[in-house]
Image (cartoon, rainbow, N blue to C red):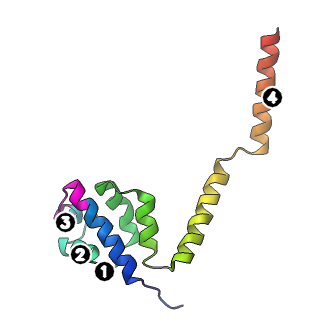
Amino acid sequence: MTSYRNPHAALQVGQMIQTHLTKSQLSHRELAMRLGVSDTKIVSFVTGRHYFPIEFANPTAEALGIDHGELVYFSLQQYFPRATVDYVWEAIVTHVFAQQEPSEEELGDKRRDKQKKKKKKAR
């Protein structure tokens, strides 16, 4: 399997991080300390010279107030074609929504509870 890398996506992620670093007034060094890397590594991420590791997405989003989903989405585009990222993203969203929908059994329980309440009010 060939390794996919998108330098344009790496630059986009870097620009996003830099924008939020400026807004948060956090320095490269402070972010580096939170991630356990050197400040020169942060500069490499920001300039797009190094690809931003996906495992840094959560702590970076927390530190800089970036939307987690947005940072993960763009970070994944460094490693996979956009069509693949979109497909995976859609599959995850579909799965999450399916998990939130009540099952037939739960719907039946809710209907029975409503009927019981109506009967009690009628008495």
How far apart are the alpha carbons under marks 1 and 3? Answer: 15 Å
Q: CA distance from mark 4 to mark 3?
A: 58 Å
Crowding at label 4, few (<14), some or many (≥20) Cα neighbours within 10 Å? few
Q: Is residue 68 visible?
A: yes
Q: 83 above or below 64? A: below
| Residue identified by numbered label 4 | 112
- In the image: residue 91, left or right of residue 31: right
Residues in magenta? 21-30
- Please name the predominant secondary structure of the magenta segment in the image: helix
Residue 53: horizontal and vertical position, in percent? 37, 73
Tell whether position 24 is magenta.
Answer: yes
* Secondary element at image label 3: helix
Q: How far apart, in angstroms, are the residues tagged by discs 3 and 2?
A: 9 Å
**Badge 4 amino acid:** Arg
Residue assigned mark 1: 50
Callout 4 touching callout 2 (CB < 8 Å)? no
| Callout 2: SS | helix
Which residue is labeled 3 in the image? 28
Is 47 on the left or on the right of 110, as rendered?
Answer: left
| Residue type at tag 3 | His
Mark 3 vs 2, N-terminal side: 3
Location of residue 96 by image quarter: bottom right
At 21% across and 60% down in the image, what residue appears?
22
Q: Secondary structure at mark 1?
A: loop
| SS category of the residue bearing label 4 | helix
Residue 52 visible in rendering: no
Report x, y in % for residue 111: 79, 31
Q: Is residue 62 magenta?
A: no
Q: Are marks 2 and 1 in contact (CB under 8 Å)?
A: yes
Q: CA distance from mark 4 to mark 1?
A: 58 Å
